[in-house]
Amino acid sequence: MGSSKENINKLRLLVEELNIRDNDVIERKELLELLMEITSDGYWDWNLKTNEVFLNANYKKQLGYEPEELANAKETWEKLMFD
């Protein structure tokens, strides 16, 4: 096993790597949202890990709602899909 200093450096590098990956995901999501806004496409996203659902404004408008009328929630999505 390496020294404490080596282990701390390895941990620091791992954290930096994870931050870079997180930032890349955030940037890609922001780009997707911008593209959807520009093209007026609607979409929804369901994070299976957190069980969170996101409905973008264009998706809500395509269904005849104002963005503030529908909550970004799994229950909202289920109601829209199955009722």
Image (cartoon, grey):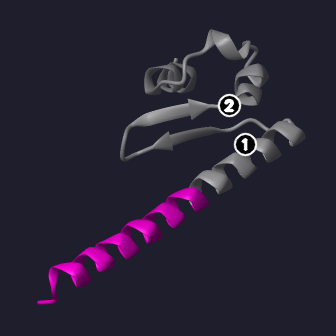
- Could you say whether the residue bearing mark 2 is in a helix, strand or loop? loop
Magenta stretch, main secondary structure class: helix
Instruction: Tell me which label, 2 or 1, sits earlier in the chain.
Output: 1
Which residue is more in the foreground, 45 or 34? 34
Reading the image, the residue beneath label 2 is 56
- State the residue lying farthest toward the bottom: 1
Residue 77, compared with residue 47, is above or below; it is: above
- Range of residues picked out in magenta: 1-24
Which residue is more in the foreground, 17 or 4? 4
Q: Amino acid at mark 2?
A: Asn
Please tell me in which quadrant of the rendered image residue 8 appears.
bottom left
Residue 53, compared with residue 27, is above or below; it is: above
In x, y percent, where is residue 67?
70, 17
Residue 75 horizontal side relative to residue 61, left or right: left
* Inter-mark Cα distance, 2 to 1: 8 Å
In x, y percent, where is residue 59?
72, 29
Residue at left 30%, top 72%? 11
- Could you say whether the residue bearing mark 1 is in a helix, strand or loop? helix
Q: Amino acid at mark 1?
A: Glu
In x, y percent, where is residue 76?
51, 20
Mark 2 vs mark 1: in front: 1
Q: Which corner quadrant holds the N terminus?
A: bottom left
Residue 14 horizontal side relative to residue 64, left or right: left
Please tell me in which quadrant of the rendered image residue 17 appears.
bottom left
- State the residue lying farthest toward the left: 1
- State the residue lying farthest toward the front: 5
The label number, if any, that marks residue 33 in the structure image: 1
In x, y percent, where is residue 70?
60, 15
The label number, if any, that marks residue 57 in the structure image: none
- Callout 1 crowding tier (Cα within 10 Å): few <14, some 14–19, many ≥20: some
Residue at left 39%, top 75%? 13
Kindly check if marks 2 and 1 are in contact, taking CB atoms under 8 A apart as contact.
yes
